[in-house]
Image (tube, rainbow, N blue to C red):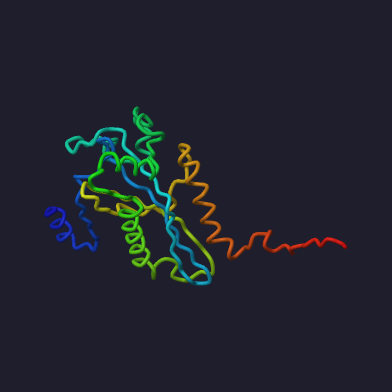
Amino acid sequence: IKTLINTHSRSNSNRTSIVQLYIDRPLLISGRKFDVRAFAMLTSTNGLLKGFMYRDCYLRTSSKPFDLSNFNRYIHLTNDAVQEGDEDYGKFENANKLSINDFQRYLDTNHEDKSISFMRDLFPRMERLVTDTFRAVYNKVDPNRNQNGFEIFGYDFMIDEDFKVYLIEVNTNPSFEVHCPLMARIIPELLDNSFRLSLDPIYQPQSLLEPQVKTCATQ
């Protein structure tokens, strides 16, 4: 770190450096690392920004046991683009994915003494972090306040041994690939809800525009 600082100081550059501490005590699933993928959306309608978060998250697991002394990327990176290249991909979970219900059952079995509820104890912390990101960029996203627009973001979270939640990154254009039955349920529901929130208020479904014809019984 000192070398990086000294190098940038001598170069008189205006570059910004970010120093991050690796999460060395992550919560594990059967000895393997995982992260939580969640989705959130910003809409801009007539210049008004609104934020939404989809409640159905899922876990992305690694294929190899966690080991800080081994820098094998299949141990530390849970991205699909990475894990798909490992021979153990899909060996433990279908497409290395777990639903929140599966995760809750794992917590109930392996951390019964903690009495942790994902939706009660962890998800609200994720919501607060998502809210913080929206507030941080409120004046930078869609600065011209275009009449209408929306974007879905992929949020990656990690949980440590003490059940502290960390936001790892926010992804634009997140993957909507369907790798398994879990994703075949989540992704269509996510998109359907997103379109209902962003498009239906502007382009009302034809069924709502058509006149309702009522039939009356003749006497």
Is residue 101 shown above or below 164? Answer: above
| 172 sits left or right of 9 in the view | right
At 53% from the left edge and 66% from the top edge, which residue is drawn?
148
In-front residue for pair 186/151: 186
At 52% from the left edge and 51% from the top edge, which residue is drawn?
191
In-front residue for pair 43/81: 43
In-front residue for pair 123/71: 123
- Hey, which quadrant is residue 120 in on the image? bottom left
| 6 sits left or right of 87 in the view | left
| 180 sits left or right of 126 in the view | right
At 25% from the left edge and 43% from the top edge, which residue is drawn?
111
| 182 sits left or right of 28 in the view | right
Screen quadrant of the C terminus: bottom right
- Hey, which quadrant is residue 54 in on the image? bottom left
Give the farthest residue toward the right.
Answer: 219
Is residue 93 shown above or below 204? Answer: above
How far from the left and from the top, in percent, is residue 206?
68, 59
How far from the left and from the top, in percent, is residue 150?
49, 61
